[in-house]
Image (tube, helix red, strand yellow):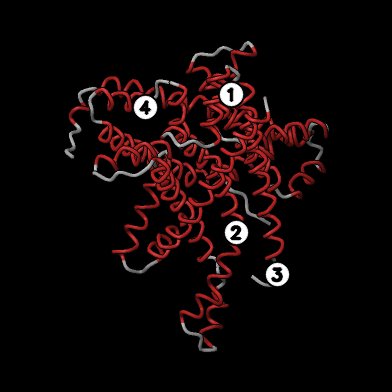
Amino acid sequence: MSIDFGLIFARMPEILAAFWVTVWIWIVSNVLAVFLGFGVATLRRYGPLWLDLLLRLLVEIIRGTPFLVQLFLLYFGGPFIGLSLDPIPAGLLGMTVYSTAYYSEIFRAGYNAIPVGHIEAAECVGLTRGQIIRRILVPEMTMLVLPQCVNMAILMMKETAILSIITVPELTLVVGAIGSQQYAFVEAMLLLALFYWFLVELSGFLGRIAEARLSKFRFAHS
Amino acid sequence: MSMRLFELMLWAAGKTVLLSAVSIMIGFAIGLMVCAAKLSPNKLLSIPGRLYVSLFRGVPLLVQLLLIYNLLPALGIMVPSVVAAIAGLSLCTAAYQAENLRGGFQSVPRGLLEAADMVGMSPWKQLTRIRAPIAFRLTLPALVNEAILILKASSLVSVVGVIELTRMAQNLSASSFRPLLFYSVAGGIYLVICWTIAGGGSLAERMLKTEGRA
């Protein structure tokens, strides 16, 4: 077996375009999911009991089934209930729903980890519920959940590879296709693995810098 | 859906469980070795250990599976796709399990080991009587979690042609034009298995719990 990466590098413009698809789907779905996940956690905490139970069931269903099956259901089953989506919107929607479930659990744990005393103190000085959420819970929670959110975002970066199965033109699909066309599939996959490895290590590194920068805002645990 | 088709789905679910269980067990064995290498004071062992964990946790499982599935024949090793699938799942979960185990071993209270030294226990005895049992109990929740993750990740081996639950749902929905039905049933079966593992895990945790001890 001979290894020749030149065959793959010759197609660099296509690979860069695919890289861009991977990155924007990753960023958009994760940003959406962070806000939606926070919303779900907040509704579960302050909403009526039936809403809490309903959301909990949904979160458990999403976390208990494979991402691939969810994508198949959305992409191949969707048209039967009038939801015909192209691969990219389907992938984006699937990623967002899947990550929202996980982020909501991170935020739920974050809410629970805030010392009750802080909330009681805020109530004593007459802050409204909205003020308590905005001024006390959100800032304190941001610090608490940041490491888990970084971790989650990195896991989601790797999940984007699965979108190739429903033909989203992202890195794995495009590099795999180039590899097949050039009869250099193993080289293509090796390159792909290195690429993702680099991306994941880079995100982890940036995440650690962000945590170090923000750690000065961390409150002391009582 | 006829009974016959549902039986096919259940048979495929059995295969999914088998694949995942075998991979978790092989992965546990590899993970123990990687963990030992990583914790070793010898740099010739700890650096490859660190590299292993970083590499297998840094590359998407799908890419690992495609790579293993295509690399082995290119190197002249002909194996059935099931073997490639189990190899991929095991190697990947080993990296995660090694990290969990490392956390467990590092959380064993120092005082217990000092006490063991005082009463003259040999390092081997300390390992088998104190460090391993405590580390195992501490990592059990993470192990259960990993089992659930691998069960879900095993759906990816459908792309290298192994017939398991996801692949079966794919085949049946392609031949019947009823993807909603078959993918929902597949999802439901995954859910039941996941909840069973989670329930069994918390039962085991409660049984292993001994109050007052580490």
Which amino acid does the dot numbered 1 rest on? Leu
- On the image, the x and y values in percent for residue B198 come to 66, 49
- Residue contact at pointers 2 and 4, CB within 8 angstroms: no
Amino acid residing under circle 4: Leu
Disc 2 and disc 1 on one polypeptide chain: no
Q: Quadrant of residue A198?
A: top left
> Which residue position is annotated with label 2?
B140
| Position of A171 relative to B141 (above/below) | above
Q: Which residue is situated farthest in the front direction here?
A: B4
The local secondary structure at tag 2 comes to helix
Label placed on residue A73: 1
Q: Mark 1 lies on which chain?
A: A
Depth check, mark 4 against mark 1: the one in front is 1
Mark seen at residue B214: none
| Few, some or many residues within 10 Å of mark 1 (<14, 14–19, 20+) | many
Q: Give whichever of A141, A148 is nearer the camera.
A: A148
Q: In which quarter of the image is the N terminus of chain A?
A: top left
* Circle 3 chain: B
Residue A145 vs residue B160: left or right? right
Tell me residue B78's x, y (percent).
30, 43
In the rendered image, which residue does mark 3 sit on? Answer: B210
* Cα–Cα gap, marks 3 and 2: 14 Å
CA distance separating discs 2 and 1:
33 Å
Tell me the amino acid under the disc marked 3: Thr
Numbered disc in front, either 3 or 1:
1
Q: Percent from the top left, x then y, of residue A219?
A: 62, 49
Q: The residue tagged with tag 1: helix, strand or loop? A: helix
Give yes or no for contact between labels 4 and 1 (Cβ–Cβ under 8 Å).
no
State the mark number for residue A171: 4
